[in-house]
Amino acid sequence: MSGRLTPRRPEPTPRPLRRAGRPRVRRLRGAALGTALATLLVPALGACAGGDAAASGGGATLKWTSSYFPTHWDPVVGGSGAQFRELALVYASLTRTDENGDAVPDLAESWEYNDEGDQVTFHLRSGLKFSDGEPVDATAVKAAVERAKEQKNSALFGDLTSIESVEAEGLDAVVHLNQVDYQIPQLLGQRVLQIASPEAAKSPEELDQNPVGAGPFIVTQLVPGTKAVLKKNPAYWDAKNIHIDNVELTSAPDAATVVSGLQTGVYNFADIDPSQADAAKKAGLDVFVQPGFNASNISLNVNKAPFDDGKVVDAVRYAVDRQEFVDKLTFGYGEATDQPFPKGYVAYDPESENTYPYDPAKAKKLLAQAGYRAGELKLDLVVPAEDPQAEIVQSQLGKVGITVDIKIDKNWATPFFAKDLTFSLYSTTGRDSAVQTLTAHFGPDGPLNLSSPYEPKGFEAAVAKVRETPLGAPEYTETLRAATRAGLESRALVFTYSSPNLIAKSKSVSDLPKNPAHIDWTGVTISGGN
Amino acid sequence: MVRRILALTSGRIAVAVLAVVALLALLGPLLAPQDPLATSDNTLAAVSGGHWLGTDYLGRDTLSRLLDGSRVSVLGSLEVALTALVVGAIPGILSVQLGRTFEWITLRLADTLVALPFLLFAVAVIALLGNGITQAMLVTGALVSPLFYRVARAATLAVARSQYVEAAIVSGASTGWIVRRHVWGKVLPPVAVAFAQTVGTGFVIVSSLTFLGIGVQPPAPTWGGLLASDLGYLSHQPWAPLAPALLITVTVWACNLLADAVRDVSGEAGRTLVNHRKARARRRGGAGPAPAGGA
């Protein structure tokens, strides 16, 4: 660089002038050298400094890049989708789940039902505070539930239909139910009731920008949609088991670049696309599948033609080759499922397995019986973005004579949740309460039931029976599976596959607890290097 | 002009490349060795005799998709250039001929359109009108049109003050006759340069939009779309993005090369160049063996 600033061919000038020229050349060289050093050193020093107060504090730093960076930091608006894992850094809940998926104490150290099963009292830990200094008490729980039920833009309203009211008595939150429901401790965990400071939540818009909870970390910097910097919350009830001092949470860049970021230490933890798993393994990273409840489906609206004809629905059911989804989309890390849960989950009903096996010949026959010749039935498959899932559905239905046009609608969510679409796709990350998963998919008001208010015969009674069965009762599993069986009579959903919660991490980050569908930082350590 | 362009090496290369691209657009779907939409279990396959460019993430033949996707890119870029030509060049010429009010209005409109970022605007239009390449390209063409407006206006201004145009006005010639007889011939060369450049720009815009998944409904293949999907599987097929990227690059380069060639052969400079070449050819002919019975 400096060489280019040196005159290549100095003019044959008189000696005094040439002497005068040398210091100028030296100055130029010096300037160039200085610029080069500055160019190299400033970013390096910046990187050492971390660019923010939290990172400069030293200690163990989790550098997590996530495809699910929260679009909202108000948990009521964020809803119970995949982003709850990131929000759980900031917010704690009444309960959490353990490695078996069972509810265990979080902010509530215990709870008990009344004899009728229509009232549950949560006993909160004493002396806890939100990060703004407000006390964590039953009043805060009551405010959180009421806000989730009443706030105009709440995404949690449909999840809390069993709750009639909450009574606050010091550290005891008494939850009154409108039906017997033993699922409540499971329900009021991290997915559905992350509790914000009631003082901060007085302005939901402000809370959305400056989240205030009683979780393991406190947000110190938030760049909406891009980056959040957090530091450990010393007042968290289980702070002694949190060994991470700082968190830098970023929105994941292009899937293909995440592995490079992990290799170079830009991140030390990331959820990755299955297509990147091999590259991550080759790069020497820890790659593992966190257990979960993911399930993808083809959503049909049986209130609209042609799906108001059961034969067409059955034709679609028989036309679906689930293994193709697993092979092409999950690179073998996922698994086929014909239920809203992965195989092996307590609510998965083995009796209903493979009710509609892949049988394209039968699908063609059913279409013919419904009065459609090959190529005559044309459907618009409406999806929010380009999705290989849609292309596989198009290809598989094409093989049985259904012509599918994929339509991308950036405003897909509005017609989907308003049940205006006829044919679409949905992938859920599941719920901690199996009953909640079932009602969300098959219930008359279920947000994932594109055919609302349609519900399969006997489903309501089967679900009510599950709610009335304590989770520890010996008949619980069979009752739950019977509800799944009743739900699967629905003509509105064809389940396809379960995608994996695939994570790659630096070896410096210790193993995570295997809590299904959750990312729990309790006990996780980060050693010196990345 | 065509003969003059073909007299240049750069012109011949540009025309050859663009002719191949045009052929791909016309016959690409017929030339595709396999159904570009047919999926198979042979996903992310390497280059082989059966799949000259391998297969994609759903087992589709990449070469077939590339050939099939040519038409969207070519038609889209032509749509941009033709829209810009019509919306820009005609008002550009008329702004000199139709008086001050028309001139003021068109100048302000051109200034306004220049200020709008066309890629962003195309995305906004698609969000409003639905996902389709035609509406996006029409809007982009309108936003690129100030280039044609200014080029056409500058050339017309240069002619409008010439003595032969003034003589035609004094003789009572109509505006239309003056434009056809005196203006159009002068405006055509710079407009042709701008057109060739704009076709290249159109390729970049179409590729950018389809790269972002905008404008074309899947699984319809496009060059930009193929590039985007290949980037997601770099760790499996690091070479895969090369084919669509090269096609886009070479096509845009050929458009710019053609624009340069048109510029080089048009006007006085072009005539001088051609005359110079003819003279050189004559000299070479004269230096040959003397005819029998010569001096």
Image (cartoon, coloured by chain):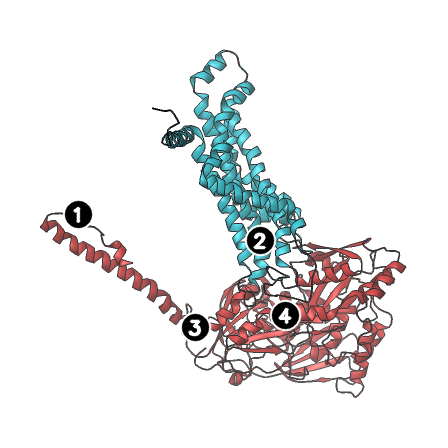
Do marks 2 and 3 both belong to one polypeptide chain?
no
Of all chains, the one bearing label 1 is A
Q: Residue furthest top?
A: B171
Can you tell which chain is drawn red? A
Query: Could you tell me which secondary element the residue under label 2 belongs to?
Result: helix
From the top left corner, tell me how far across and down residue B289 is, in percent: 37, 31
Q: Which residue is mark 3?
A: A55
Image disc number at residue A82: 4
B228 up-or-down from B276: above or below: below
The numbered mark, 1 or 4, whose residue comes first in the sequence reads 1
Q: Amino acid at mark 4?
A: Ala
> 10 Å neighbourhood of mark 1: few (<14), some, or many (≥20)?
few
Q: Amino acid at mark 3?
A: Ala
From the top left corner, tell me how far across and down residue B112 is, in percent: 51, 38
A50 up-or-down from A466: above or below: above
Of all chains, the one bearing label 3 is A
> 10 Å neighbourhood of mark 3: few (<14), some, or many (≥20)?
many
